[in-house]
Image (tube, coloured by chain):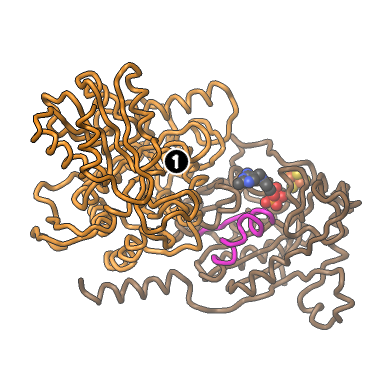
Chain colours: A brown, B orange
């Protein structure tokens, strides 16, 4: 039984200094923030031991609102900063939040290598199928044929599937959720953080202001209904044909494997080096 | 390298590693590139022995990102590269300037632009070290001319990074990096090791970017109980984004002030035979040695020549340069590029007689060449 999404913890937010936030009314990022707060509160990790790093974009603004150790880095590079933090202080819980452009265009190389390396970091990728902050240009997840401010004649590139990319690159835990399926989202984020090794949570979210406006989803509620109609659980998808899955995406847990994390592997290196003499 | 001093035959690149470790470096992230790779290789052997961490990242952008993260978490950090990699690091270097993160980047210079001359020396990245990343920003750039320097200046580089919360670029070149020379380690006179100042107030009073008189706010490690926000956006004293003109102005002035306050110790140079000099060579890096030889040759011919070796290139050691420029009838700036640092020298004293000698063909400037120029200054 999954619990229903509970009320968020007030003391996890920087009320006194950072609100109102910069996001558009109705943006899915608010839901992601709520989910992140609920998921982390449940883990009962002291705030002093939690790190939230981001890159640049609407998504990248999230850390400023959260009362953890927070970091707003450069576009695409958040995982590299998180790598340094985690290696220097493995006892910290390090989460990295990125937009789809941030994580898979400019930061695509860092993303696949972080997954391959399997350092204990949780990567949360908010996939709104566009570059929100810069005004709706196409991103690596913009669907073929849709419109963007740099593809007004229709987009001719094919989209990445972020979660599948993470699985192939070697992440230990991969989940996909949406801002419509909030209870599941809380659960996925919590599982991702608890996982030893690199975990990825892809979150389908709405940028109705930019992507939606150009693609008949200008209303955030209609956008969320689109998510509801197009999401299929991993379990159900396994029984569906390729044709049936044509315009659908799967949600749930796509990978959950156990292998030694980078931290454990590096400790072995230290032990060997110490034994090797000078 | 155990307790009692011993003589070693080391490369400049190896001496940088020894200096970095002596200064307390415990984290290295890098990506292989000639002629700097020996630094990464040696670090991968040495760091895990002393509970430190080495990681080879997917590129140089990731390397500097990782060392910034590790430094924010309290580690003393290093990366090493050469021209192409240094170019890739520029954006995150600006982030480190903006967020005042102590770190050291070694650039073992090779011929450029682009892939250029991977195995030949050059000094053509000098202006890039100062202005490579966008926007006004503080930075310290040091240069090494020998194996002994590589050790000693590496220690200074870490000390300055920690003391002023600023990135330090340590410029070496293919010649210094690969030349083997005898060096005594640890050095006869032990070197001071400086650590960043941490906050002493309770966390609720901590102002991460406070505008104090030194211009350098105490730095709390991530995870030490002082939760705060770090952003590359322009930020106020509390660390949160701002576009308030007063706060933006205050930030830039503090950046300037923190290095101005430390000018005396930051701006390092060495004078050779300058006391009665009428002409002088100004040099840095590998060229220093040719210059010293040339100055001695000139002295043998009865010419009162001297040498000013610049260790700190930025902030420009104005006082030392100005005194030489005032004293000498003419100076010669010798460098392995098409004339970069000579502009800084001219700017120190526009009415002085500054000549230049440049070589940019992948070869060291020879003593004879400098001597020849000195004879007709
Ligand atoms: C190096 C660099 N290139 C470009 C930009 C401009 N930029 C800012 S945010 C952004 C894209 C944001 O899109 P995404 O990562 O999908 O996040 P979203 O805003 O949709 O949350 C771009 C291109 C930048 N800040 N830095
Ligand atoms: S532009 Fe899009 S992603 Fe950004 S806040 Fe508005 S709706 Fe959200």
**Residue B35 location, quadrant:** bottom left
A195 left or right, relative to B80 = right
* Prevalent SS, magenta region: helix
Q: Is residue B27 magenta?
A: no
- At a point 21% along the width and 43% down the height, the residue shown is B367
Decide: is B170 above or below A94: above
A10 left or right, relative to B81 = right
B268 left or right, relative to A235 = left
Decide: is B193 above or below A98: above
Span of residues in magenta: A93-114
Residue B217 image offset from top left, x and y in percent = 38, 34
Decide: is B19 above or below A237: above
Closer to the camera in the image, A29 or A8: A29
Residue B254 image offset from top left, x and y in percent = 42, 27
Residue B197 seen in the current view: no
For label 1, the residue is B128
């Amino acid at each position: 039984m999954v619990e229903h999404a509970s009320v968020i913890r007030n003391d996890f937010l920087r009320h006194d200094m950072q609100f109102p936030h910069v996001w558009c009314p109705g943006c899915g990022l608010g839901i992601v923030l709520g989910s992140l707060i609920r998921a982390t509160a449940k883990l009962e990790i002291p705030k002093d031991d939690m790190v939230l790093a981001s890159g640049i974009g609407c998504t990248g603004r999230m850390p400023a609102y959260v009362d953890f150790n927070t970091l707003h880095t450069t576009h695409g590079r958040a995982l590299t900063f998180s790598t340094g933090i985690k290696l220097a202080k493995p006892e910290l819980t390090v989460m990295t939040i990125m937009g789809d452009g941030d994580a898979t265009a400019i930061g695509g190389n860092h993303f696949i290598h972080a997954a391959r390396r399997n350092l204990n970091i949780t990567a949360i990728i908010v996939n709104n199928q566009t570059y929100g902050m810069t005004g709706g240009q196409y991103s690596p997840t913009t669907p073929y044929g849709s419109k963007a401010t740099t593809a007004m004649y229709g987009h001719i590139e094919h989209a990445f599937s972020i979660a599948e990319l993470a699985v192939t690159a070697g992440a230990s835990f991969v989940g996909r959720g949406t801002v419509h399926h909030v209870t599941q989202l809380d659960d996925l984020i919590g599982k991702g953080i608890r996982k030893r090794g690199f975990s990825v949570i892809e979150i389908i979210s709405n940028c109705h202001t930019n992507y939606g406006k150009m693609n008949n989803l200008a209303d955030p509620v209609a956008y969320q209904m689109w998510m509801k109609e197009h999401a299929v659980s991993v379990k159900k998808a396994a029984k569906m044909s390729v044709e049936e899955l044509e315009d659908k995406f799967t949600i749930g847990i796509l990978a959950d494997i156990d292998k030694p994390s980078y931290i454990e592997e590096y400790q072995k290196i230290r032990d060997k080096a110490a034994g090797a003499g000078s | 390298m155990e307790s009692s001093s011993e003589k070693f035959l080391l490369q400049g690149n190896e001496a940088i590693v020894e200096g970095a470790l002596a200064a307390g470096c415990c984290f290295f992230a890098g990506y292989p590139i000639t002629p700097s790779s020996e630094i990464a290789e040696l670090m991968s052997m040495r760091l895990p022995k002393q509970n430190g961490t080495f990681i080879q990242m997917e590129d140089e952008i990731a390397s500097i990102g990782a060392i910034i993260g590790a430094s924010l978490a309290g580690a003393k950090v290093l990366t090493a590269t050469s021209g192409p990699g240094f170019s890739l690091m520029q954006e995150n270097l600006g982030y480190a300037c903006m967020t005042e993160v102590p770190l050291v980047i070694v650039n073992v210079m090779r011929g450029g632009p682009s892939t250029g001359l991977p195995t030949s020396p050059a000094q053509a990245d000098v202006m890039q070290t100062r202005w490579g990343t966008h926007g006004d920003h503080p930075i310290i750039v040091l240069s090494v001319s020998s194996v002994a320097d590589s050790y000693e200046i590496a220690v200074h580089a870490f000390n300055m990074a920690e003391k002023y919360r600023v990135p330090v670029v340590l410029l070496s070149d293919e010649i210094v990096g690969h030349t083997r020379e005898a060096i005594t380690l640890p050095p006869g006179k032990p070197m001071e090791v400086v650590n960043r100042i941490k906050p002493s107030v309770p966390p609720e009073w901590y102002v991460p970017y406070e505008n104090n008189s030194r211009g350098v706010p105490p730095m709390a490690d991530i995870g030490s109980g002082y939760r705060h926000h770090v952003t590359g956006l322009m930020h106020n004293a509390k660390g949160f984004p701002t576009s308030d003109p007063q706060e933006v102005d205050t930030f830039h002035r503090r950046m300037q002030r923190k290095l101005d306050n430390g000018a005396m110790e930051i701006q390092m140079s060495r004078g050779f035979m300058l006391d009665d000099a009428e002409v002088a060579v100004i040099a840095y890096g590998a060229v220093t040695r040719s210059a010293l030889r040339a100055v001695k040759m000139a002295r043998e011919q009865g010419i009162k020549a001297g040498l000013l070796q610049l260790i700190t290139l930025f902030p420009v050691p104005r006082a030392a340069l100005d005194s030489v420029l005032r004293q000498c009838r003419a100076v010669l700036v010798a460098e392995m590029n098409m004339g970069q640092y000579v502009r800084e020298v001219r700017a120190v004293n526009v009415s002085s007689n500054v000549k230049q000698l440049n070589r940019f063909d992948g070869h060291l400037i020879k003593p004879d060449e400098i001597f020849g120029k000195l004879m007709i200054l």
